[in-house]
Image (cartoon, helix red, strand yellow):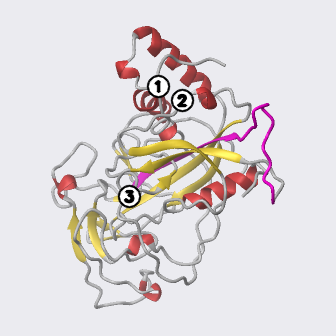
Amino acid sequence: MIHLPLRRHLVGPIRLAFTLLGLPHTVWTSGVRPAISCPSSYPFPTSKTISADNTSYCRRHSTMPSSAGPHVKSRCPQYPGSNIKRLSVPDDKVDWTQKWPEYNPVSYTAPSVLNNPAWADPDIGSFSPKFNTVDGAVDRTSFEGSYEVENGKPLNPRGRTGLAGRGLLGRWGPNHAADPIVTRWKVDVKGAKVHHSVSQKPVLQFVSIKRKDCGEWAIPGGMVDPGEQVSLTLQREFSEEALNSLSSSPAERAEIHQRITNLFKSSGFMVYKGYVDDPRNTDNSWMETVAVNFHDDLGNSVSELPLEAGDDAGQVQWVDLDSSFPLYANHSHFLEIVAKERKAHW
């Protein structure tokens, strides 16, 4: 086993890992489900836009478990990071096709977005974005298909959220992210796979971070800079955030670069591509993601890199895949698909 002379982590590493062009997606089905309590914030406090390149990924499975109803976290009573209250939207009024002439939600865009950071759009009126297309360096297309635009503003393809504006999200319309699910087999001291006592199936482990902002365990994830090829973003993010290459010596950076190159040579398994029921979503801005599984089958790649929490994480560690382990947002659904694909315990 080779050890780097560095203490490192995998929080942003694999964090952009895999945004991808031309892969199919599956739209969740609708139904009815009760309201749930919502987390105070989402793992990614700011928003940038994804730009896809020709990186290819395995398409063995790209479905998502059916949703039991319309988006729920996107209707959390209090908008994260603020004192703003959403207008309560009942399940039967979420869909835009349902008439609701009295619907008049408050409009809110966070000060951090209004300060015009590089990752955010200007306000509507001061510029004219081209929706449902690639607008310069910004991809404004949606994995959900064509979305409606009303009064110059895009409408959330999953329906009303009780809040207009952009909230904490930088882009009008879709804000693209990537959720890499990094896994390995749990093994005993002799290197043999550990099987669960009940299911008798081998146990998978994944890299999980505990967020400082909401205290929940989650899959690492992140955004891609406008106009940047994902393959280049992956290596940059992995080097700087996961392996702290900026503070490394030239020799260490060279070794890190080689290990990263080898790490991402293998094709990933795309778990999901589409809309994310995110508490930051609004009527006019929403999160979408591509979730991809990168599996270290032999335990000699990712597994050799020591984990160390980055700026956004309180903790980072390998966690056993198990249906009883609570996770942020829809991440448990992603992991369930991975477990089934790998024929592992869930």
Magenta range:
174-198
In the image, taking residue 29 as reference, residue 309 lies left or right, namely: left
**Residue linked to disc 2:** 306
Q: In this view of the protein, which residue sits in the foreground, 227 or 104?
A: 104
The amino acid on which the numbered mark 2 sits, given as a three-letter code, is Pro
In the image, taking residue 301 as reference, residue 97 lies left or right, namely: left
Q: Residue at x 46, y 64 (%)?
A: 146
Residue 28 covered by magenta stretch: no
Q: Is residue 80 visible?
A: yes
The amino acid on which the numbered mark 1 sits, given as a three-letter code, is Arg
Whether tag 2 and tag 1 are in contact, CB under 8 A, the answer is: yes
Q: In this view of the protein, which residue sits in the foreground, 238 or 196?
A: 196
Q: Is residue 16 visible?
A: no
Residue 197 image position (x, y, % from top left): 80, 55
Label 2: few (<14), some (14–19) or many (≥20) C-alpha neighbours in 10 Å: some
Q: Which residue, as the protein is rendered here, is positioned at the far top?
A: 251
Disc on res. 214: 3
Secondary structure under the numbered disc 3 in the rendered image: loop
* Mark 2–mark 3 distance (CA, rounded to whole Å): 24 Å
